[in-house]
Amino acid sequence: MQTHFLKFPKGFLVFLFFAVISVKCVAQDSYEIQVYGSEPTEKGKTMLEFHTNFTANGNKAIENGVVPSHHSLHESIELTHGFSSWFEIGLYLFTSASPSDGYSWVGNHIRPRFSIPKSWNWPVGLSLSNEIGYIQRTYSADTWDWELRPIIDKTFFDKLYVSFNPTLEKSLKGVNINQGFVFSPNFKMSYRPISKAAFGVEYYGVLGPLHQFDTYQNQEHQIVPCVDLYLSPDWEFNMGAMFGVTNVTDKLVFKLIVGRRF
């Protein structure tokens, strides 16, 4: 008797394994700090990313039942698989280690994303990300949330890159469930003087509900000088230091993204 087995790419099998974990467990915040580009993961390929963020100077008090961010180390694993030239799915596993709460699993998110294919030759890159998932109440005032992230980007003169993510966030369960959509814009501009590196600045903000923004000192604004390294087509490196400029923003966060394509 002969048995036939379906053959899948190794990267896709890893993606399925991670998906099972996420469904079983099933924000930007300081777990995944990134301004998105519009180009999706290539069809049939899988990107594995590690997001490492350390809050050197943050909130030192418990607020709304959420543990302090000061001296916390957030490690997030992101696995993204490209299913076509216009569609990918990303999965996230969030963890935290802090002096106040030790090491813990924080939550999981799933992120389908649709993009305009390059073959359409649009003047700008354009895609739409939908991220939804769960975070433990200890780490967030809202345990279930939804992030709607339009992504618009363009490269000028092969050296200057600009990306704008006018992100909307919505609580699905928790303290802010009746707040409506919150406007959280992200922006990046970088210049690539040499083939191996680009230098730039990123911005992350949380302005408040769309119907009425918070006062300035109750908004979150972070400026991030950053460096991107292009050492290999299969690798991704991004690092920066985040400086908060308002009362409610963590004052200093170091971030590092290391990614590998399979």
Image (cartoon, helix red, strand yellow):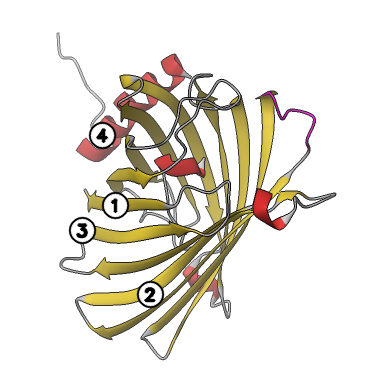
N-term mark: 2 or 4: 4
Q: Amino acid at mark 1?
A: Ile
The span picked out in magenta is 174-179
Task: Measure the alpha-carbon separation of dots 4 and 3.
Answer: 23 Å
Is label 1 in a helix, a strand or a loop?
strand
User: Mark 1 — residue?
Assistant: 257
State the residue at coordinates (33%, 39%): 79
The mark lying in front, picked from 3 and 2, is 2
N-term mark: 2 or 1: 2
User: Mark 4 — residue?
Assistant: 8
N-term mark: 3 or 1: 3
N-term mark: 1 or 4: 4
Q: Amino acid at mark 2?
A: Gly
User: Mark 3 — residue?
Assistant: 235
x, y percent for residue 195: 21, 81
State the residue at coordinates (38%, 75%): 200
Q: Does the residue at mark 3 contact the one at mark 2 (Cβ under 8 Å)?
A: no
